[in-house]
Image (tube, helix red, strand yellow):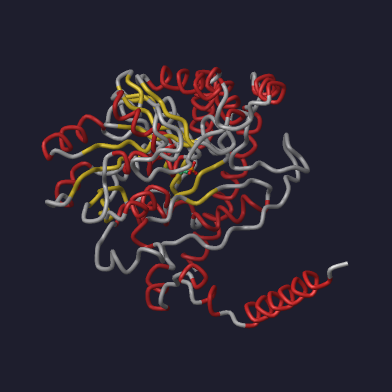
């Protein structure tokens, strides 16, 4: 038996163990990295912002009565009641489980039709859909991209990935969408694009935004992550700008678990996005790359679920609109609560039923959230604006976005899903109205004593 290899191997192993032990004892390589430290607000910044930002997430209890006694109302629920199971079975039976396979193409075609666009390119999620669009437009260091401060972090992160600079604009207080009247102040010689977000399913004012973008030679990108099927005068969001992006995360109007889509009417642009999504493989010569691409592909299994969901999108949107009517009817008389708005001529898809809590309600939005959570009703606070995120606060110090801050302070959304019945909504609303009655009574007693 030749032990020499064994001894050498053992020595090597001991050496490596030594190295491992050294690495575990010495935190230098990892802990020094900024990701490990994160970025905290200074106590001064935190004191200034604590009135605006939501408190820690309330603990969810269980319903003690009502249609879901002993259970909870999650803020969003997935409803896989169409062909999802059958199409997934086809993926498994055929062995097509990665990004090759027929469902990706079928889903892209069906979704493009639904969005009123010529092309759709499926990808891994809504964040990378935005990154693909920005990359395909050649946006990079030295460029500026305008977006609303009132959005989810992904809109800003995608711009950061390209090395371009984020420029923020405040929102309209009624639609919660970027305020077109404020955009021109943010445009500079370096501005290349505007990303508009159709917030909580309500379309932004695309006609005015297109006018502004065209007048300044800027790309208009639609972040429609929350607005599948929303319309302006019968035209679907995602079909107005140079490109639209969608998310299919599990809480979205339609879902693939995780997933995203880029929509466009430009064939060449779609081709570039498609290539970037897939490591920029050359279409004719394999393992041949003319630029740096990404692996942002969607799997055949995700697309199978997406196709089944797209087949039911009309039903899903109709259910959300019904839900909005039930909520409006029961909360309309609840004083101090501002209900969601729908501008004339637009179809909002009410991704989330967002309400704002004003002083006559008798307590803050956070207290309302806590009290609903104790009854088993989960809610979500509105977005924390980009300019006060710890990661951005230094960049935007001194800039003022009062509408976004007020939305953050006062807004929350109630459970919104196709699975809710009218009785469910009635029970949720009873709880909201009871909380209002109790809190406004004690508020009045306290203020008169
Ligand atoms: C406005 C907006 N943009 C982008 C995204 C990112 O989508 P995803 O989570 O699929 O990456 C989201 C997700 O919630 C969103 O709400």
Find residue 205 and report its horizontal and vertical position in percent.
Answer: 26, 33
Q: Is residue 187 above or below residue 26?
A: above
Q: Is residue 215 left or right of residue 43?
A: left
Q: Is residue 252 above or below residue 52?
A: above
Q: Is residue 56 left or right of residue 120?
A: right
Viewer-closest of 340 and 23: 23
Viewer-closest of 163 and 65: 163
Find residue 184 and report its horizontal and vertical position in percent.
Answer: 15, 46
Find residue 210 and report its horizontal and vertical position in percent.
Answer: 20, 32
What residue is shown at x 26% (from left), y 31% (from top)? 206
Find residue 100 and report its horizontal and vertical position in percent.
Answer: 55, 27
Q: Is residue 220 left or right of residue 123?
A: left
What residue is shown at x 39% (from left), y 22% (from top)? 115
Q: The N terminus lies in which quarter of the figure?
A: bottom right
| Residue 132 found in image quarter | top left
What residue is shown at x 46% (from left), y 45% (from top)? 335
Viewer-closest of 78 and 375: 78
The total of numbered circles placed on residues is: 0
| Residue 223 found in image quarter | top left
Which residue reaches farthest front? Answer: 1
């Amino acid at each position: 038996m030749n032990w020499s290899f064994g001894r050498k191997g053992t020595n090597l192993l001991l050496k490596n163990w030594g190295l491992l032990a050294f690495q575990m004892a010495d935190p230098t390589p990892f802990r020094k990295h900024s990701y490990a430290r994160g970025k905290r607000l200074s106590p001064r910044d935190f004191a200034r912002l604590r009135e605006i930002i939501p408190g820690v997430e309330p603990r969810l209890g269980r319903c003690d009565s009502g249609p879901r006694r002993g259970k909870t109302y999650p803020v969003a629920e997935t409803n896989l009641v169409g062909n999802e199971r059958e199409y997934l079975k086809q993926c498994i039976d055929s062995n097509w489980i990665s990004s090759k396979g027929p469902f990706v193409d079928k889903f892209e075609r069906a979704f493009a039709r639904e969005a009123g666009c010529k092309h759709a390119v499926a990808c891994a999620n809504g964040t990378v859909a935005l990154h693909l669009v920005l990359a395909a437009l050649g946006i990079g260091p030295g460029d500026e991209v305008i977006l609303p401060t009132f959005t989810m972090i992904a809109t800003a992160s995608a711009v950061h990935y390209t090395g371009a600079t984020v420029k923020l604009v405040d929102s309209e207080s009624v639609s919660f969408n970027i305020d077109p009247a404020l955009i021109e102040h943010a445009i500079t010689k370096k501005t290349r694009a505007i990303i508009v977000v159709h917030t909580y399913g309500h379309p932004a004012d695309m006609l005015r935004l297109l006018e502004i973008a065209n007048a300044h030679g800027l790309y208009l990108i639609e972040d429609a992550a929350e607005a599948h099927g929303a319309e302006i005068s019968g035209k679907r969001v995602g079909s107005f700008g140079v490109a639209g992006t969608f998310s299919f995360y599990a809480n979205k109007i339609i879902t693939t678990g995780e997933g995203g889509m880029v929509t466009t009417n430009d064939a060449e642009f779609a081709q570039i996005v498609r290539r970037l999504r897939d490591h920029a493989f050359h279409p004719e010569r394999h393992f041949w790359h003319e630029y740096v691409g990404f692996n942002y592909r969607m799997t055949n299994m995700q697309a199978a679920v997406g196709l089944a969901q797209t087949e039911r999108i009309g039903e899903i949107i109709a259910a959300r609109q019904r839900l909005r009517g039930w909520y409006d009817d029961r909360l309309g008389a609840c004083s101090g609560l501002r209900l969601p708005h729908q501008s004339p001529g637009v179809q909002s898809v009410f991704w989330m039923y967002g309400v704002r809590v004003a002083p006559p309600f008798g307590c803050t939005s956070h207290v309302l959230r806590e009290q609903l959570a104790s009854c088993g009703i989960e809610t979500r606070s509105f977005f924390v604006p980009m300019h006060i995120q710890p990661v951005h606060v230094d960049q935007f110090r001194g800039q003022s976005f009062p509408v976004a801050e007020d939305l953050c302070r006062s807004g929350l959304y109630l459970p919104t899903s196709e699975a809710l019945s009218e009785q469910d909504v009635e029970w949720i609303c009873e709880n909201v109205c009871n909380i209002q009655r109790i809190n406004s009574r004690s508020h009045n007693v306290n203020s008169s004593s």
